Image (tube, rainbow, N blue to C red):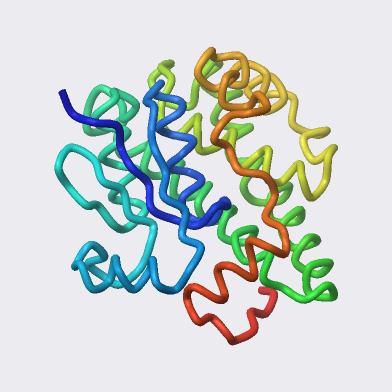
Amino acid sequence: MAGKPKLYYFDGRGKMESIRWLLAAAGVEFEEESLETREQYEKLLQGGSLMFQQVPMVEIDGMKMVQTRAILSYVAAKYNLYGKDLKERALIDMYVGGTDDLMGFILMFPFLSAEDKEKQRAVVVQKAISRYFPAYEKVLKDHGQDFLVGNNFSWADVHLLEAILMVEEKKSDVLSGFPQLQAFKARISSIPTIKKFLEPGSQRKPVPDDKYVETVRRVLHMYYDIKAN
């Protein structure tokens, strides 16, 4: 019997959080090794575990997988969250790609100055309500089904819920003009594995704080400033 997947990353969201979400949605227990020191990171590098010298890295099924999208695609396929045929998989990829674009505006947020955070907050909300949420609202309205693709729970649904909650942390009423997405959020949040992941004490990470930022900068020797988009 294969062991639990093991995740190597920082003790925070970053690029690993979507992997945590997808594993949790699939009902898969996983372990984590949090990078706290440069020495831990150097050990992974010297051991050849990081093909492109970067994390996230996930040990699963005898592989040491890197590249977030590759890991997510593997997990989705392995646990039947990737559609029933090639067309459904293409739609899932398309929707996940759009959600990734939106998340990209949020990923840099913790590393910005206070002034740039306010600018970026406005960018995140504007992009969400003018570009991304209308697209998903239309998909749900047009097909009238509970899920984004094939009327089955998939990676696309998990990824969109994660993004919705992230944007709501920037503006709590951001879904006020999107009734389909409000209903979608309630539906997906009530799926047992998702509901469990959203409860206190789960492996879901909180909003990144100054300690997380300091750890990432120290471990990666990331001494440059990041600017808002």
**Residue drawn at 63 percent across, 27 percent down:** 198
Closer-to-camera residue (88/172): 172
Against 26, residue 120 (above or below) is below
Give the image location of residue 201, x and y in percent: 63, 28
Against 202, residue 67 (above or below) is below
Closer-to-camera residue (133/168): 168
Give the image location of residue 16, x and y in percent: 46, 50
**Residue drawn at 50 percent across, 82 percent down:** 221
Residue furthest bottom as drawn: 224
Which of the 4 image quarters holds residue 61?
top left
Give the image location of residue 6, x and y in percent: 33, 42
The quarter of the picture where the N terminus appears is top left
**Is 47 left or right of 191, judged from the image as shown?**
left
Which of the 4 image quarters holds residue 52?
bottom left
Against 35, residue 145 (above or below) is above
Against 2, residue 221 (above or below) is below
**Is 87 left or right of 136, judged from the image as shown?**
left
**Residue drawn at 66 percent across, 74 percent down:** 229
Give the image location of residue 34, x and y in percent: 47, 53
Closer-to-camera residue (77/23): 23
Closer-to-camera residue (19/123): 19
**Is 213 left or right of 20, judged from the image as shown?**
right
Q: How many marks?
A: 0
**Residue drawn at 49 percent across, 35 percent down:** 21
